């Protein structure tokens, strides 16, 4: 029998219940996943090393840790392709859009307000699972570099002009399929299509 999927939710205590409920929403294949939690401190890194989750759902701003440093430490500990990191944006704070999130090393970014659809897509796409009827290019969860490349090539230099909401604008939706490890030319090609 295979071990259940493990998802580590790293967030401030006040945000953890919301993130877990989004993962466990009715009809989600993620309801069977083992959900672990942490607040971003040393105990979170120890739990990561012990439990070896496949997906990390992490808030951008943590009261008890540094999200970017924690992601880096987790990636250093695991094989590069062994974990998939979904960064959750801030309601108010320094990381509200995908351009703000570029330096974190996440695989996907989901902005606030959060929706079941966006969080589920981000997690399931990282696992290579079918994402449901909304999947494909209409997904609200967008790879961070693909969104940034699209925004910059479109002349949207103002960081506040690029927001990921529960419904992705058509001009950036086609960038969803571009993996973060794509060559710069592939990202440029995806941006040109948009």
Image (spheres, grey):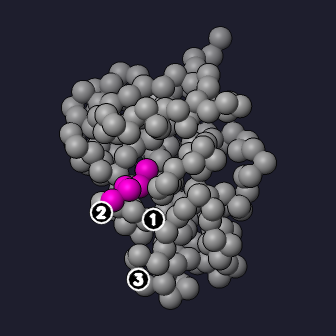
The label number, if any, that marks residue 98 in the structure image:
1
- The quarter of the picture where the C terminus appears is bottom right
To which quarter of the image does residue 185 belong? bottom right
- Which range is magenta? 88-92
Q: Position of residue 141 (x, y in %)?
A: 58, 56
Q: CA distance from mark 2 to mark 3?
A: 14 Å
Viewer-proximal residue among 79 and 3: 3
Image coordinates of residue 32 in percent, x first then y, are 62, 22
Count of marks, rendered view: 3
The residue where tag 3 is placed is: 158
Which residue lies under the disc numbered 2? 94
Does residue 79 show up? Answer: no
Magenta stretch, overall SS: loop
The percent coordinates of residue 148 (x first, y second) are 48, 72
Mark 3 element type: loop
Distance CA(mark 1)–CA(mark 2): 11 Å
> Which-is-in-front pick, marks 1 and 2?
2
Residue 28, position in %: x, y?
Answer: 67, 33
Residue shown at 57% from the left, 48% from the top: 115
Q: Is residue 142 left or right of residue 40?
A: right
Quarter of the image that includes the N terminus: top right
């Amino acid at each position: 029998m295979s071990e259940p999927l493990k998802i580590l939710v790293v967030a401030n205590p006040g945000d953890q219940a919301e993130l877990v409920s989004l993962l466990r929403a009715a009809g989600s294949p993620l309801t069977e996943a083992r959900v672990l939690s942490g607040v971003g401190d040393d105990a979170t890194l120890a739990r990561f090393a012990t439990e070896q989750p496949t997906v990390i759902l992490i808030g951008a701003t943590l009261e008890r840790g540094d999200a970017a440093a924690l992601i880096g430490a987790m990636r250093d500990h695991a094989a590069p392709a062994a974990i998939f990191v979904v960064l959750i944006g801030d309601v108010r704070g320094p990381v509200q859009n995908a351009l703000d999130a570029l330096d974190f090393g996440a695989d996907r970014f989901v902005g606030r307000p959060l929706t079941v659809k966006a969080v589920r897509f981000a997690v399931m796409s990282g696992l290579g699972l079918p994402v449901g009827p909304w999947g494909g290019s209409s997904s609200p969860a967008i790879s961070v570099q693909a969104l940034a490349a699209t925004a910059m090539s479109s002349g949207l230099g103002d960081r506040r002009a690029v927001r990921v909401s529960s419904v992705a604008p058509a001009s950036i939706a086609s960038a969803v399929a571009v993996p973060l490890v794509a060559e710069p030319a592939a990202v440029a090609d995806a941006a040109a299509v948009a």
